Amino acid sequence: MPDSPYFTPPPRRRPRNGVRAVAAVGVVLAIAAGGSYAAGFGPFARGDDGPDPAAMKQARAFLADWAAGRLPSAAGRTTRPGTAQEVLQSFTAGLDIDKPRLTAAGEAKEAEDGTLGVPFTAKMPVTGLGTWSYESRLPLREQEDGGWKVDWRLSLVHPRLSDTEKFRLEREETTPPNVTDRDGTSLSGGEYPSLTPLLGRLAGGSGGGPRGAVELIDRATGETVRTEATFGKRPDPARDGKPVRTTLDATWQGAAEQALTEADGKNAALVALRIDNGEVLALANSPATGFNRAASGTYAPGSTWKIVTSSALLLKGAVEPDDVVDCPKYLTVGKEFHNVETSEYPGATFRKDFTESCNTAFISLRDKLDDGELGKVARTYFGVGQEWHIGIPTYDGSVPVPKDETEKAASMIGQGRVQANPLIMASVTATAVSGEFHQPSVTAVTAGTAGNPDETRTEPLPDEVVTQLRELMRATVTDGTAHALADLPGEIGAKTGTAEVSDDQDNNGWLVAHRGNVAVAVVVEEGVTGGGSAGPVVHSLLSAVPEDPS
């Protein structure tokens, strides 16, 4: 294939140090400012309260479209749509980037050329290697019609991308690490596809995993100008090819991979872990070879978060399961909140509110908690938001102090800025039904971190609260929204969740459950409801494994 300004194919010769160059991205173009600037007006000319909200909205929308892979839409927000789409596609595909995470951060400033510069952080997961993080800036230019567009230029994608320099991804050919489950059974990506991107990470300090780098190269000569990011570790001679044992269980991992076929092709993720020590038995994603949604995803947990909200209310004595907490169809707190299918339960008890997942009832109790109390309970008792070290990269959750009453109302039902993933929610479930947080672990070396300066520090839940939470979750299976699990053997407790994403996307479906010594969490993107989408996944898993792991 002939070389192009967008993609540099792998060189025919093998580079030094066993490195094979596989992709490069960038564009050779003359950079021209698009659109025109309204004379006499600037991005701050509308007052002293900060930049024009319309400009900031456009910046956030561009980043959201780019991150979600909606590249035609992202490009349409720029002054050069055709070029922008080609470059964004080349950059993400050529560098094997999956699910970019792009966040506007910092103070917007007016530049000398009249544009409004909006800084953002980029976390680019490079498939099979790791995440490349950097900072850049979006230039916004006001148009003649008063609207705003991203003033297209290569440097907004990355500050060093230019008409003279571009990026190339190099992967070093390495021997796949020998990774086993808890009993010594070999775990291969062929048999357990979800582990394919993780095997190198699971190898940890052995250095047996994949290695590579993102390099900045000269467009004319192809020579490396600088190395932007490196991935992987050099082999540890002390290990001498010894297998790396994980906490995973081959039986559970296989059942988890199969269970995700119940998600009907939707993006989904599953985590199952031991309640008594946090050891992860299974971690699966769909699609299997892409982004690790299970441990690194950032989702609103929806009504599964009511486990934490209930804990906060019960800890404070603000409510008891038999207290009457009315469940109307609608409740307005700055905006109108409603229940799934606008259901209502007049005169319902708090137990009924939990088992039927009544949003309006939970929101009506918001004044029982201080503004930062929900986040404090999440961190203090459940470890959410602390730094976890489980053996692979993770996102460890966030429960910010709400900015206003509307956001506080949303946080009561796992919306707003509350963020979690299946790993977090499986751990939340385990903590709720045992009373004690155990930092999850995937590699045996991270299990039991006592004395570790980075160890998470939590307090146990009172026995009375644990008893109440277990009863509420059991009732959700026998009499509530998780009734789809009622025919399975064992005393199962669960909580469903439906999480809003945006006006133009279907809700994500959630379900968390526990049986015996195992807690499970599943999310199905755009699954509409938790019971309808995540329910069949959990049912499939628990049908295929023993009631309790050995």
Image (spheres, rainbow, N blue to C red):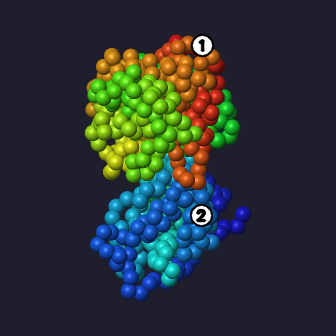
Indicate which disc, 2 or 1, sits on the residue closer to the N terminus: 2
Q: Is residue 514 left or right of residue 449?
A: right
Q: Which mark is residue 396?
A: none
Q: Is residue 446 above or below residue 40?
A: above
| Residue furthest out toward the right | 1
Residue at point 52%, 48% (across, down) = 501
> How far across and how far down the image is residue 107, in percent?
33, 64
Q: Which mark is residue 73?
A: 2
In space, the residues marked 2 and 1 are separated at their CA atoms by 48 Å
Q: Is residue 165 left or right of residue 372?
A: right
> How far across and how far down the image is residue 98, in percent?
56, 50
Q: Which mark is residue 489?
A: 1
Task: Give, as a three-letter code, the residue at label 2.
Answer: Ser
Task: Give, as a three-letter code, the residue at label 1.
Answer: Pro
User: Depth check: 426 or 91 in front?
Assistant: 426
| Residue furthest out toward the bottom | 39
Q: Is residue 535 above or below residue 87?
A: above
